[in-house]
Amino acid sequence: MSLFEECKNALKNDFQIISDIDVEDVYTKLNMYPIKQNYILWKNIDFKDFDDMEELLESMQTIQNENIYVVADDQNIPVFTSKLTSIIENIYDVMALCPKVFIFNETILLEPLFPTYTVRVAFNPNLNKPHI
């Protein structure tokens, strides 16, 4: 079983592959964040690092049920969506997909900091969201 299949199984019913038609919309949403050459410009955005996934879940209480996209920097791994809670509860399966994984929606951006188990989190700077 591939790492992608393991991730898919871990996310169970909260997992859905994004169709080729809708992938461009997903990339448009990702580009709302400061990105250059496939790297997030963290110096241009407020963020917080989390080593404890329980603490991360607690800090995301108001948006835990939002759908979130996962984009791996590997063309063999399809773009997919799941609930934020499911992603965080299974973060190690998601992180294992590839060294660079973007987890985001219009509200929030998460990036696992490979090779550590730290997840960096930022809210979309174009929204009036509270800082984490």
Image (tube, grey):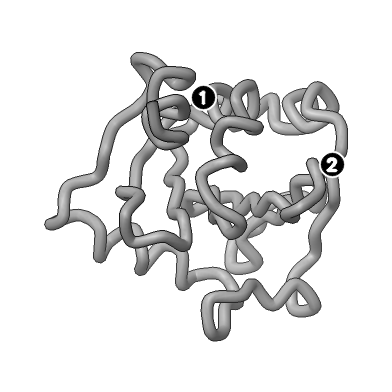
Q: Are the residues tagged 2 and 1 within 8 Å (C-beta)?
A: no
Image coordinates of residue 11 in percent, x first then y, are 45, 21
Mark 1 neighbour density, 10 Å: few (under 14) some (14–19) many (20 or more)? few
Residue lying furthest left = 21
Pick the quarter of the image with the N terminus.
Answer: top left
Image coordinates of residue 115 in percent, x first then y, are 76, 52
Name the residue located 46 percent from the left edge and 35 percent from the top edge.
3
Rendered view: 22 above or below 96: below
Rendered view: 90 above or below 118: above
Q: Quadrant of residue 88?
A: top right
Query: Mark 2 highlights which residue?
Result: 50
In the image: residue 7, left or right of residue 88? left
Name the residue located 57 percent from the left edge and 84 percent from the top edge.
36
Mark carried by residue 65: 1
The three-letter code of the residue at mark 2 reads Phe
- Helix, strand or loop status at disc 2: strand
Q: Quadrant of residue 5?
A: top left
Residue lying furthest bottom = 37
